[in-house]
Amino acid sequence: MSDKDLIRSVEDGSAWDNFCDTLKETGKQIMRPEAPADAFTRAEGWRYLTRLTRIALDMFMECSDRDFPTFYRPSHETAKIGADNPDNFYERAEINGKYDYRITGTRGTVAYLGLIAIAGGYEDEDANMRSVGAIDTHGGLEVNEDGTVEIILSREPKPGNWLKITEDTIAVLVRQTFLDRNSETIAELKIERILEEGVVPEPLDPAQLAENLIKTAGFVQGTATLFADWAESFLDKPNELPPADQAYCQKIGGDPNIFYYHSYYDLAEDESLVVEVPRIPDCENWNLQVDNYWMESLDYRYLKIHVNKHTAHYNDDGSVQIVIGEHNPGHPNWLTTAGHRKGTLAFRWIGADDIVHPTTRVVKTESLK
């Protein structure tokens, strides 16, 4: 749409009507025939769409000024996207790849700090959120003696910490990965475009407002569709944990240092899924999490729904067994499904030297006691 058409849509109210119509249309993703139709899963689905809308409003309305970027949380305890990692603290800032930016702050003590530059997003027709540059503590992020960091984002190489961006870069995504949230300190970061002194934000632009409404609704629709399609693709291999398509994971914003597994579980109340990893390779971290059908992590604030390198109980030979189910058989690595008979799972190797595939089997929970 031209700026003239966008302004007209603000004046006549059609910008708001179209925004609401797209959100209404997105509700069809919750009603898909293959998705569970019980009230519990449907309720989570409707809540999921409200959460996506909250995220999108931050992304495209409140934090969309690329000349004056700010970090916001695109996924957190009460707003979740695409098997969000319970061990992660996510931050994102919208930027313009034509310009240079500076990130400064403190390193903190988290086990892993990684940044990727992103081109494209879930609001686009191809839902392509590809990484165009990355820097992290696994691959050489330099920290000053006083614990501070500085990273320059630009198209041309810079000395020190440099995150490559391209002209079509639209955002930078920060992942901080904990081994133990209760004992580690997050990195405190801020971002700024490298501008001349005295430059201040422009007043609200009606045409930009109309375009941002389109992008907000498009993100909600694109994200809901993308992960509903992905969940559907798991259904033919229930209760398994096969490797994901790693290229596809990178396309939709995955961390290049992570090897991913995704799957679908379907368990009776008296059944458990046993996941076994014969050995743990040298790695920054690993984890397994339980998600609902919409690929939202379950409530890790209050429930034991994931296990990682630090929190897992290991067998004497270094292997790990994890039990997933409704009832706790007294296993040290038990994860609850929190009332879900059906849902999704995610397993990750982070910075692993080699890849060891987990195996799965369904058993009666009683047999594990």
Image: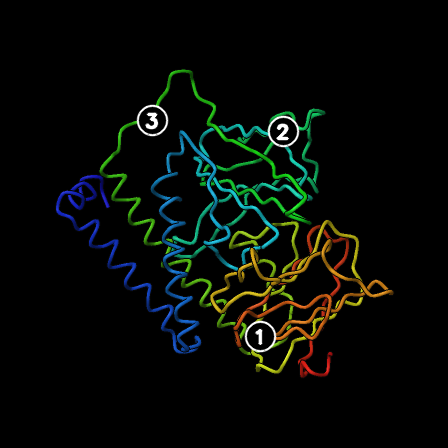
Q: Residues within 10 Å of mark 1 (few under 14, many from 20)?
A: many
Instruction: Give the SS element for disc 2.
Output: strand
Q: Amino acid at mark 3?
A: Pro
- Residue 313: x and y, percent? 77, 62
Question: Is 207 drawn above or below residue 121 in the view shown?
Answer: above
Return the residue at label 3.
201
Comparing 323 with 194, the one in front is 323
Foreground tag (1 vs 3): 1
The quarter of the displayed image where residue 33 is located: bottom left
Q: Position of residue 168 (x, y in %)?
A: 45, 40
Circle 1 SS class: strand
* Residue type, mark 2 in image: Val
In this picture, residue 188 sits left or right of residue 18: right
Q: Residue furthest left?
A: 12
Q: Quadrant of the C terminus?
A: bottom right
Kindly identify the residue that appears in the image at 38 percent across and 49 percent down.
56
Q: Gap in Å between the C-alphas at discs 2 and 1?
A: 42 Å
Q: Residue at x 32, y 53 (%)?
A: 217
Q: Residues within 10 Å of mark 2 (few under 14, many from 20)?
A: many
* Residue pointed to by mark 1: 265
Q: CA distance from mark 2 to mark 3?
A: 27 Å
Residue drawn at 46 percent across, 63 percent down: 227
What's the distance in space between the residues labelled 1 and 3, CA to CA? 49 Å
Image: 237 above or below 198: below
Q: How many circles with numbers are drawn on the protein?
A: 3
Q: Amino acid at mark 1?
A: Tyr
Give the percent coordinates (x, y) of residue 349: 69, 57
Side of 140 relative to 18 (left or right): right
Labels 2 and 3: the sequence-earlier one: 2
Could you say where residue 145 lies in the image, as x and y percent from the top left?
A: 72, 25
> Which dot marks residue 301?
none
Label annotation for residue 149: 2
